[in-house]
Image (cartoon, rainbow, N blue to C red):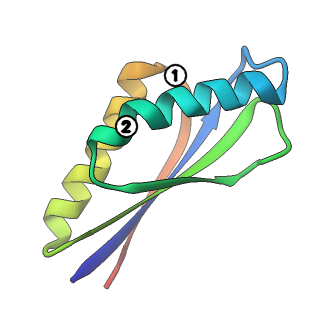
Amino acid sequence: MVVALLTVELYIPYAASLKDKRAVLRRLKDRLKKFNVSVAEVGHHDLWQRAGLGFVAIGTTAATIERELMMIADEIERLEPGLITRTELEILT
């Protein structure tokens, strides 16, 4: 069994309040439900224009999990271009 964690940091320049930020994050999380992962907001809770999302996946091979998590980063970039400032992938075996 392999567990992997993808951390994505986002910069949301047009968010003028926490409500605006939460709307963007909710929309992203809803559209990413098609991937078989768990997602949570893991950083920058009180900042309007920054967010940290954590995605966790469990599978049988590291390559499969890594590919799926990188597809999530690509999908975020497709849905909201330019928001991602940093990604970090960790394989936790």
Viewer-side label of 2, 1: 2
- Helix, strand or loop status at disc 1: loop
* Quarter residue 85 falls in: top right
> Considering the image in quadrants, where does the N terminus appear?
bottom left
Residue 22's disc number: none
Q: Which residue is mark 2?
A: 32
Q: Nearer the viewer, residue 3 or 87?
A: 3
Which residue: 52% across, 22% down? Answer: 82
Residue 74: give x, y in percent of width and height: 32, 34
Q: Which residue is mark 1?
A: 82
- Helix, strand or loop status at disc 2: helix
Which residue: 31% across, 52% down? Answer: 69
> Considering the image in quadrants, where does the C terminus appear?
bottom left
**Relative to 17, residue 26 above or below:** below
Which residue: 72% across, 37% down? Answer: 50
* Quarter residue 17 falls in: top right
Residue 22: give x, y in percent of width and height: 69, 31
* Quarter residue 61 falls in: bottom left
Three-letter amino acid code at the position of disc 2 = Leu
Judge from the rendering whether residue 36 lies leftward or rightward of residue 86; answer left or right.
left
N-term mark: 2 or 1: 2
Judge from the rendering whether residue 85 lies leftward or rightward of residue 38; answer left or right.
right
Badge 1 local density, few (<14 within 10 Å), some, or many (20+)?
Answer: few
**Relative to 86, residue 92 above or below:** below
